[in-house]
Image: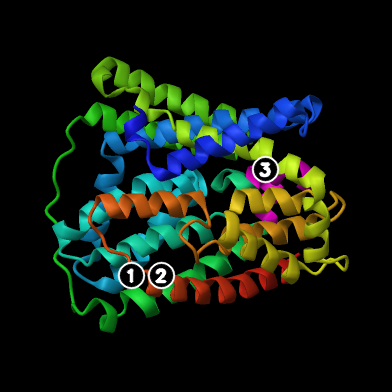
Amino acid sequence: MWRRLGVLDWVRIGLLALGLVFLVTGLLPWARAAESFESVGPLLIFLVAIIVLAELTKEAQVFDAIAARMAVLGRGNYAALFVLCTAFASFVTIFLNLDTTAVLLTPVMLALAPRARIAALPLAMTTIWLANTASLLLPVSNLTNLLGMDKIGLDATEFAARMWAPQVVSIAVTMAFLWVFFWRRGERRDLRYTPPVLEPVADRALFATASAGCLLFIVLLLAEAHVALAATAAAAVVVAAFVLRARERLTWSLIPWQLVVLVTGLFLVVPTLSAHGLSGLMSWMIGAEGDPYRTAAVGAALSNAINNLPAYQAVEAVIPATDPDRLLALLVGTNVGPVITPWASLATLLWFESCRRHGVRVPMRRFLLTGAGLAVVGLVATVWALVAFA
């Protein structure tokens, strides 16, 4: 098993080990650690359940069927396919979490590319950019949203009512950048694409049950059930179907242990660093005047430097709960901003691994420059929408 671990796996394990060292040596008090895990426990349950749900939904060919039908519906027109792909990626990110888009939707889109004779890079960039920038609307869309819900003091409906305008703006800016830099005729070279031949799903019962499971999750969210409960109930329905019809496909690899290790490590390391000088640095960086643009910019810059999860945790610790507008601006920075460096978000790291496995070359210079442009324009426009529609 140890030989199969990649560099990122060792980084996650190292982070957890460092956190445990802080705990054992007393740098992180046990009471503070217990407080952290009391808040992170339900998030870990949600994270495991939603990834299992998404993995089995992919195994049931739900994503494949939707992607193929989108290509057929586009009828060879790239503009129509572009709108359909952005809508699909945005929907998956909003309702099933950005990591689902990065981990599961990316290989589906990359598999569609050769079938429809479409360049793979535009499809890949659509998934990763929208995995980040379309993750503002609901608490479940991004782990950073879930981390901030208690302090922000909004329920899911209130959160969506506050973030709908920033979400629309961030998706619109992302679509503009995608079209100009990856999808327009001068970039893709082909005038039209070839719609793929639709193939029947292997197991209609699994397909129907997985589809129903995803719908159940969305319905429970709309009914304001706790995200951990909603994800667990939906995943249980789909797991039961696989137990009856394809038990051999239920393996331990479905459990996203890497994410669990990473999040657990972060909840040990970041509070320790905050208690030993990090909070003072964060307070200086965001300033005392409460400027939402500065707060979002700091969140984005730190996300691209060290990853958006520790960036959010570090900055959130110094923003009072009485300032929810600045907390929401921080979410804009840590959700929309992490599109420059490969390590800016966990979704981006997972996306790069998926592209490498599928033999898709991502030009790094182009990735960095276009991502920087999207981060700057997207951040300014989205924070403007946050302030204007307050």
The answer to whether the residue labelled 3 contacts the one labelled 1, judged by CB atoms less than 8 Å apart, is no
- Give how far apart the Cα atoms at labels 2 and 1 are: 6 Å
Assess disc 3: are there few (<14), some (14-19) or many (≥20) residues with their C-alpha within 10 Å of its C-alpha. Answer: some
User: Does residue 237 belong to the magenta stretch?
Assistant: no
Q: Give coordinates of residue 115: x percent, y percent.
A: 14, 57
Q: Which residue is at a point 62% across and 70% down the rendered structure image?
A: 379
Task: Determine whether the residue tagged by mark 3 lies in a helix, strand or loop.
Answer: helix
Task: Give the residue type that dot 3 points to.
Answer: Leu
* Residue where numbered disc 2 is placed: 367
Callout in the foreground (3, 2): 2
Q: Nearer the viewer, residue 197 or 373?
A: 373
* Residue where numbered disc 3 is placed: 147
Point out the tag, 3 or 2, that comes first from the N-terminus.
3
Task: Give the residue type that dot 2 points to.
Answer: Phe
Q: Which residue is at a point 54% across and 61% down the rendered structure image?
A: 338
User: Does residue 157 belong to the magenta stretch?
Assistant: yes
Q: Give coordinates of residue 54: x percent, y percent.
A: 39, 37
* Residue where numbered disc 1 is placed: 363
Point out the tag, 3 or 1, that comes first from the N-terminus.
3
Assess disc 1: are there few (<14), some (14-19) or many (≥20) residues with their C-alpha within 10 Å of its C-alpha. Answer: few
Instruction: Name the quadrant containing residue 129.
Output: bottom left
Task: Give the residue type that dot 1 points to.
Answer: Pro
Magenta span covers which residues? 145-162
Callout in the foreground (3, 1): 1
- Give how far apart the Cα atoms at labels 3 and 2 are: 28 Å
Q: Is residue 249 above or below residue 374?
A: above
Q: Which residue is at a point 53% across and 33% down the rendered structure image?
A: 261
Q: On the picture, is 26 further left or further right than 182?
A: right
Q: Which residue is at a point 46% across and 46% down the rendered structure image?
A: 99
In the picture, the disc for residue 289 is none
Instruction: Name the quadrant containing residue 266.
Output: top right
